[in-house]
Image (cartoon, coloured by chain):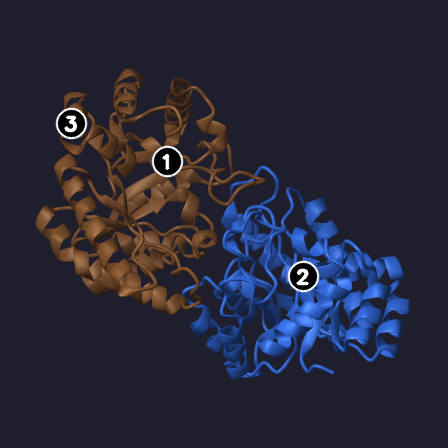
Chain colours: A blue, B brown
Amino acid sequence: MVAGLSLNTVTVKEKWGLADCIEGCARHAIPGISPWRDVLQAMGVTAAARHIRDAGLTVTGLCRGGMFPAPDAAGRAAALDDNRRAIDEAHRLGAACLVMVCGGLPPGSRDLPGARAMVRDGLAAILPEALAAGVTLALEPLHPMTCADRSVLSTIAQALDLCDDLGPGLGVALDCYHVWWDPEVAAQIERAGKSGAGTRIAAFHACDWLVPTTDLVFDRGMPGDGVIDIAGLRAMVDAAGYAGFTEVELLSRRWWAEDPDHVLATILARHKAS
Amino acid sequence: MVAGLSLNTVTVKEKWGLADCIEGCARHAIPGISPWRDVLQAMGVTAAARHIRDAGLTVTGLCRGGMFPAPDAAGRAAALDDNRRAIDEAHRLGAACLVMVCGGLPPGSRDLPGARAMVRDGLAAILPEALAAGVTLALEPLHPMTCADRSVLSTIAQALDLCDDLGPGLGVALDCYHVWWDPEVAAQIERAGKSGAGTRIAAFHACDWLVPTTDLVFDRGMPGDGVIDIAGLRAMVDAAGYAGFTEVELLSRRWWAEDPDHVLATILARHKAS
């Protein structure tokens, strides 16, 4: 087994369901898996938990909760209900965390502070259930280019401010692709390690920034193919007390078109070389 | 005349040269212009300065200097030479500032702190010439999605840190498109107003963020067509002591395909409505 590597199922989503991913990880000796909820629900949570356990895999995260902002109270309440289901699924899977993609502006809105308040309020509302279930809510800052439609949470500093504000039960999912550009990345990762109750880093996701990047969502690079100093970021989270897996999560039309066994072999080779 | 509006020439670059832009501004009663250096050099600096003066236009900026990082010393020296020519051109035009797009990673590099040091060193090297010429170097933080290939300067905070570090002669060019997502935008604009020697805001550029955005460079939105609270940002820079123009700078394949007179009329209508 290669220590510390996990496959996020979105990386091969065009050709493999969850059963294929579980078998693929076992076949390639990749010890971790992080499912998205669509493939999880397609298999069924109970069956998935059993298959993953039987394959000896660690569930490094469940993707994803969040998406709190909505134009009206009914929409926000529906988001909370969906997050509660996600917490339950993460608990039943024994996932290390539930990754939170917090959501963008409500349709038609230009009120960014208002959307951020909806994120805070949504997290505060579901935190008791998460604590009761023993599920860490891993706040994932997303690249600022997703601010309008996916995540008004853009920086590690914002995520840690929410951790400080709302208390235990929250952490940070740190994805190289989303944070590498941040002038505060080193200082904020160091801050994440000084919470007084262990590191706040709950997940570490690796993928690369290609030059040029041709799409705002679906052109992420295989680790090693771009300009991000992934090894340097991994060293920072190590120093901040994170001892967990490196999860590879690619949203890439180029890699989705490949044979998934080739994708997994490539991920493994890049991980060994890093 | 509509007070406070300026046309950046890149907005109509596919169909109009600088002479067309000058005549277009006069025809539409747009009192400011901000040329890019390619159209400026095509007309010739002396002729351009005379035509702009004869048309009664204010030059709100010259685009652009910067692009400091390079793989070797010769490349960095060539960048300095080009910046010195840009300072001279800005001086001869009587431009309110030289807009600085500072540059990305050198090709093949993953050393982001190193590239940022090259930017700092480059600015320090040309600052004496800028001061002597009376040309403000307006540091433009660019959206983090341009970090790899256009600007390792991503935030207002970074720009102000450089202003504090290097001293008088520097300012900030604040483009709504590049900074609207920043959780610190209000605090940093307020900081820009407290320099002790007048506001650090040297330019205010308006364009909008479309949902969805289909290209990382050439899909900027006409003010009013997207999700940015441009009026709110303008109020912030007003409160921080900026009394200058609102410059409209669109890089947009959609608007480049339009009749430039229609583009200018639309800009003017949106500006009056804002």
Residue B29: x and y, percent? 28, 19
Q: Could you say whether the residue bearing mark 3 is in a helix, strand or loop?
A: helix
Three-letter residue code for mark 1: Glu
Q: CA distance from mark 3 to mark 1?
A: 23 Å
Which of A137 and B202 lies nearest the eye of the viewer?
A: B202
Residue pictured at 80% horizontal, 66% vertical: A21
Residue pictured at 52% horizontal, 41% vertical: A110
The reply, left or right, for residue B244 in relation to residue A172 is left
The answer to the question of whether label 3 and label 2 lie on touching residues, with beta carbons closer than 8 A, is no
Determine if marks 3 and 2 fall on one subunit.
Answer: no
The reply, left or right, for residue A94 in relation to residue B144 is right
Determine if marks 3 and 1 fall on one subunit.
Answer: yes
Q: Which chain hosts label 2?
A: A
Disc 1 designates what residue?
B249
The crowding category of the residue bearing disc 3, from other C-alpha atoms within 10 Å (few below 14, some 14 to 19, many at least 20), is some
Residue pictured at 76% horizontal, 62% vertical: A260
Three-letter residue code for mark 3: Ala
Q: CA distance from mark 2 to mark 1?
A: 42 Å
Q: Could you say whether the residue bearing mark 1 is in a helix, strand or loop?
A: loop
* Disc on res. B47: 3
Q: From this viewpoint, is residue A191 visible?
A: yes
Q: From this viewpoint, is residue A8 visible?
A: no
Which of A45 and B258 lies nearest the eye of the viewer?
A: B258
Residue pictured at 19% horizontal, 52% vertical: B81
The crowding category of the residue bearing disc 2, from other C-alpha atoms within 10 Å (few below 14, some 14 to 19, many at least 20), is some
Q: Residue furthest top?
A: B27
Three-letter residue code for mark 2: Ala
Which of A64 and B111 lies nearest the eye of the viewer?
A: B111
